[in-house]
Amino acid sequence: MDIKISEETVKNTTKCPRNFKCLTDGRDMCPVDKTSGKVLFLKENGYKNRDCPYLISFGFTSYICTCPTRYEIYTHYKI
C-alpha cells in the first residue's frame, strides 16, 4: 500500500527517530486501539519502539501516541 501524508504533517513531525519508516513499512507502526482528539491509544503492550519521543506511558501497561504522522495514517487509512 502506498501511504501518503500531507506536507504540513511531515513538517509537524519534527522528532521522528525512524525517518518516517512507517510510510514504507507498515509493520513498524504501533497498533491503535482507539482515538480521542489527536491522541491515539495503543493496544495494550502494542508499542513497537520504546525510544519514540511521541510515545507516552498511560497507566501501567498502556501507551498513547502523539505522532502527527501516525495520527494522519490512522485517520486516513484506518491502519
Image (cartoon, rainbow, N blue to C red):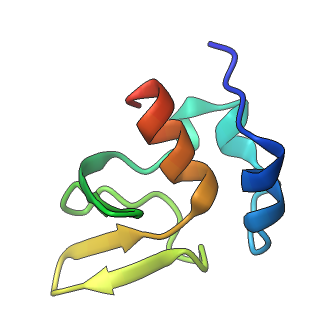
Q: How many marks?
A: 0
Residue 53 image position (x, y, % from top left): 60, 80
Position above or below: 3 against 61:
above
- The N terminus lies in quadrant: top right
Q: Is residue 23 left or right of residue 53?
A: right
Instruction: Specify the quadrant of the image occupied by residue 35.
Output: bottom left
Residue 60 image position (x, y, % from top left): 16, 86
Q: Is residue 38 left or right of residue 33?
A: right
Residue 10 image position (x, y, % from top left): 79, 53
Q: Residue at x 75, y 40 (%)?
A: 6
Position above or below: 59 against 78:
below
Residue 41 image position (x, y, % from top left): 27, 62
Q: Residue at x 48, y 70 (%)?
A: 66
Q: Is residue 39 left or right of residue 26?
A: left
- The C terminus lies in quadrant: top left
Position above or below: 27 against 12:
above
Who is closer to the viewer here, 51 or 13? 13
Q: Residue at x 76, y 49 (%)?
A: 20
Q: Residue furthest top?
A: 1
Q: Residue at x 79, y 72 (%)?
A: 14
Who is closer to the viewer here, 33 or 49? 33
